[in-house]
Image (cartoon, rainbow, N blue to C red):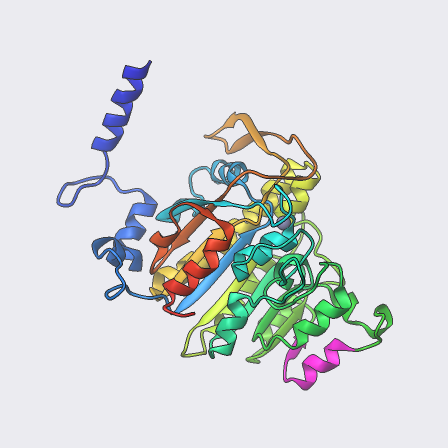
Amino acid sequence: MKIRYAFLLLATCMMLPVKGQQVVQTESEKIVDEGSVGKWLDTPPSKTTAKRAKNLIVIIGDGMGTAQVYSSVVAQCGNSNFLRFPFSGFSRTYSNNKYTTDSGAGGTAIVTGCKTDNHHVGTLADGTPVKSILSRLHEQGLATGFVVTSSVLDATPASTYAHVSHRKMYDSISYQMTQSGFDVMIGGGISNFRPENRQDGLSPIDTLLKKGYEVTYSLEEMKKSTSNKLMTFFCENYYGPVAPGRDPVLAEGTKKALEILTKNSKGFALMIEGSQIDWACHNNDAPYMEAELADFEKMLKVVLDFAQKDGNTLVVVTADHETGGLVLLGGDIEKGKNECKYITGGHSGVMVPVFSYGPCAEYFSGIQNNIDLMPKMLKAMGRQ
Ligand SMILES: [Zn+2]
């Protein structure tokens, strides 16, 4: 058997494209040749010659482990956008106090570069606030924003702008959101912005309006907006599951965010979260999970098409943790079917994948800690 595998490996290596030879290219190889990344492969980065990324798009698939990604690759029958990334690696997700992280500590680690205890958002375990990469880049004059399929106050989006010792401190989180200075914020969660639903009786919507945001409440209103400062709420708390009938808010929200953020000549940073992959896996609901991943794929297409054309945008896709302990026991690759089995209703502690595209994308290869991602992103942008 070993000899047979060795032969297969040799045969596979011999099929890899070599300059000057006529070879059949895969989709990802074509992109490597044609896009900005190709230049990178020809010119390995160094401190002095590296081309830096002007823009950053960080994408978090909540609960999206390797099995979830592969289920999407199969479900897309080989046309998965995950196959377009020229570089990939892994991220170790443990938190400051637990082998298995929650979304608060996981999101905080990715965007701030700091480990914290579970349930904390944007602070160290002792409560010391830590700044996200979006906040840092906002202070440096770049445009910033986020698009999520959960409430805008959920742990992952909150980790980009808030500093609280518990992820459920929604009054405080929503107030801090109004002070973020981000240019575009898209998600659910209006109810916590209504004075009657708050302990403090404040009206964060009024604060947003005073600060010059246009506040919209539907996909259609969002699309029509011409404002450079946009807040869009799609629903009271959370969107329903993507299947059936949910608007394609992730892809459409991403298009709108890019339209606004690209107006800043200094560049931009955008965080996008596929929030409900996690919820589907908590429910051990494979059709729900696959529908959310299909939604995620549509957003990835928007992002990668943009980054390919732009040539100055670093795209990093990862997860805060895996959810469900998903195992793929079988399926049908031709028909795009997976046989899914979950072994837990909670999170697991396994490494999660990292995919990267664009200038300095190679920084994200190999096994890294989740807190390594943020400094690598800053380095890729030549910033601190
Ligand atoms: Zn999570």
Name the spot of residue 273 as percent of width and height, x first.
58, 56
Relative placement, left or right, of 79 versus 271 is left
Looking at the figure, which quarter contains the N terminus?
top left
Assess whether residue 197 is covered by the magenta stretch.
Answer: no
- Answer whether residue 153 is visible to the viewer in this image: yes
In this picture, is 37 found above or below 347? Answer: below
Q: Is residue 71 above or below residue 225?
A: above
Q: Write down the region rendered in magenta.
A: 203-215
**Quarter holding the C terminus?**
bottom left
Compared to residue 31, the image places residue 342 above or below, namely above
Q: Residue at x 45, y 73 (%)?
A: 262
Answer with left or right where residue 83 lies relative to residue 280: left
User: Depth check: 248 or 375 in front?
Assistant: 375
Q: Residue furthest front?
A: 126
Provide residue 79's location: percent of width, then percent of height: 43, 43
Instruction: Pick the residue in front: 375 or 7.
Output: 375
Q: Position of residue 53 (x, y in %)?
A: 36, 66
Identify the residue at image location x=29%, y=51%.
32
Residue at far top of view: 1
> Is residue 251 at all visible to an observer of this figure?
no
Q: Residue at x 78, y 78 (%)?
A: 203
Q: Is residue 226 left or right of residue 374?
A: right
The residue that appears at 56% across and 68% down in the rendered structure is 131
Q: How many marks?
A: 0
Using residue 13 as the reference point, say whether residue 290 is left or right of it. right
Percent of width and height locating residue 134: 52, 68
